[in-house]
Image (cartoon, rainbow, N blue to C red):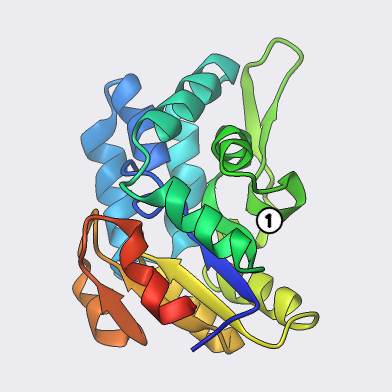
Amino acid sequence: MSFDVICFDCDSTLSRVEGIDELARRVDLFEQVAALTNAAMNGDLALEAVYGERLALIKPDQAAIDWLADLYIREMVEGVSDTIKTLQDNGKLIHIISGGLRQAILPLAALLGIAEDQVHAVDLLLDENGDYLDFARHSPLAVSGGKARICRRLRMHHSSLAMVGDGKTDLEAKLAGAYMIGFGGVVKRPLVQEQADVFVSDASLAAILPYVL
């Protein structure tokens, strides 16, 4: 199959880490926050039930976002750079669709040659001192069904779209007519293995290429 647009989740797909969980680890709240993240990614809780609660516990500031941006790049999944370049060389439009924090994802996107307007994630709101205020509560990506909404927007301009990701929120892209490739190279979630159109377990993201070219 061939697709005009290939969309990628970020956490546990482009990078080995779950960003908000790592921000929690940084302030000794990992177990509490990771339990909420896993509940949402496994489909046990709605994303909106945990999103604000996690950030209210962590209160990430500018220094934390800069730290996470570096971590995303250091922990890039095997094969990411080559996979993205191969897709771009074949004329594919690449988007990142993530429930993560946009400011932390943008440096990784820039490294991969993905334009800022092709990065869909949740904006963090900071004050003039760089301290945490809130997050963009209107963002569709902070609630269940948000990835389907972004995919529907993209499909208004492109006939065929694939979504690559590891969690329940990535499966939602199927509601927008996307072909969903479950990536289990970092974490294998039974729900995704069952419901994805295809599931790859390889540690390298390059394992998706036969399904999108």
Name the spot of residue 163 as percent of width and height, x first. 50, 73
Q: Residue furthest top?
A: 129
Task: In this rendered view, identify the residue nearer to me: 151 or 55.
Answer: 151
**Badge 1 local density, few (<14 within 10 Å), some, or many (20+)?**
some
Residue at (36, 87) in percent of width and height:
197
Q: For residue 165, which quarter of the picture?
A: bottom left
Left or right: residue 4 compared with residue 166: right
Numbered circles on residues, count: 1
Secondary structure category for the residue under label 1: loop
- Is residue 59 at all visible to an observer of this figure? no
- Residue 33: give x, y in percent of width and height: 31, 40
Q: Residue at x 56, y 70 (%)?
A: 6
Asked whether, in this view, residue 89 is left or right of residue 210, the answer is right
The one nearer the camera, 160 or 169, is 160
Residue 41 visible here? yes
Q: Quadrant of residue 190?
A: bottom left
Vertical arrangement, residue 114 with respect to residue 141, above or below: above
Residue 202 point in image, percent of width and height: 21, 63
State whether residue 77 is above or below residue 187: above
Q: Looking at the image, which residue is at 55% across and 64% down?
A: 87
Which residue is farthest front? 89
Q: In the image, 183: left or right of 123? A: left
Residue 24 picture location, percent across and down: 35, 30
Q: Is residue 24 above or below residue 123?
A: above
Question: Circle 1 is placed at which residue position?
Answer: 139
Question: Looking at the picture, which amino acid does disc 1 mark?
Answer: Ser
Identity of the residue drawn at 58% across and 81% down: 3
Which of the two residues, 116 or 33, is positioned nearer the viewer here? 116
